[in-house]
Image (spheres, rainbow, N blue to C red):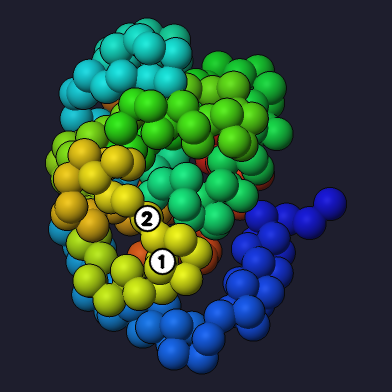
Amino acid sequence: MATLTEQHSNFYTTHHAKLPADASATLNSIEVEHSASFDFFQAVKAGDKLPDFKLRDTFGKNVTRDELLAKGNIILSFYRGEWCPYCNLELCALEKLLPEFAAKGTTLVAVSPELHDQAIVTSQKNEVTFPILSGVGNGLARQLNIVFKQPERIKDVWALRGGVDWQVRYGDESLEVPVTGTLLVDKTGTIRNVHLDPNWTKRLEPTTVLTWIDGL
């Protein structure tokens, strides 16, 4: 079975081969600019405490940090939205390891700025059974200093796929998304491991998270 990295690489190659040259160049230039401008020094780090939060999940429940910590360790996976194929591939890969995470006393939740009904669409499309939290307005991501404002020219690329209605999906027109990343939080609320990559086509292998948990 292909790794997540291989799946992303294959999709990238296929996707960009189908795009007009100018659209492919636009996506690549935005990724390069984002990677160059992202401030890792200001972003969340291992050793930080996870901020408190109260976010609605795809099951209609308001979930707090402390409720999750009461169950054990937490994996937080930040993704951009259902329109992002790289995010969808990652969610599916995480779902496959859900039983192993649970066996290690760890709760997996995904977080995105999607409105609640849109998060449900994402959950159903990818057939994930773990909660997706609606971090509308990127509140939690902002506290972790991992918010990226996409440039307006990204809309030209989206238009080739029918467009992305930001108001419907997110409730605003900010074009802000979280930097895609994965955090492992221990039972005390301390963030023990962090993986962030401003290149949204690259993600942490879910099997690496199992290694993280074993190291707690």
Give x and y (percent) for residue 121: 49, 32
Give x and y (percent) for residue 93: 65, 42
Quadrant for residue 164, please give it.
bottom left
Question: Callout 1, which amino acid?
Answer: Trp
Q: Residue lying farthest right?
A: 1
Which residue is at a point 36% across and 65% down the rendered structure image?
198
Q: Residue lying farthest bottom?
A: 21
Quadrant for residue 140, please give it.
top left
Q: Is residue 126 visible?
A: yes
Of the numbered discs in the image, which one, if any, rests on residue 175?
none
Where does label 1 land, which residue? 158
Between 110 and 82, the one nearer to me in the picture: 82
Q: Which of the two labelled residues, at mark 1 and mark 2, occupies the earlier sequence position?
A: 1
Whether residues under marks 1 and 2 lie with C-beta atoms below 8 angstroms apart, the answer is yes
Between 32 and 47, the one nearer to me in the picture: 32
Q: Residues within 10 Å of mark 1 (few under 14, many from 20)?
A: some
Judge left or right: residue 30 versus residue 152. Answer: right
Question: Callout 2, which amino acid?
Answer: Val
| Label 2 element class | loop
Alpha carbon distance from label 1 to label 2 = 6 Å
> In the displayed structure, would residue 33 be above or below residue 163?
below
Give x and y (percent) for residue 163: 40, 60
Judge left or right: residue 160 versus residue 171. Answer: right
Judge left or right: residue 158 versus residue 63. Answer: right
| Label 1 element class | helix
Where does label 2 land, which residue? 164
How many numbered discs?
A: 2
Which residue is at a point 71% across and 64% down the rendered structure image?
6
> In the displayed structure, would residue 58 be above or below residue 206?
above
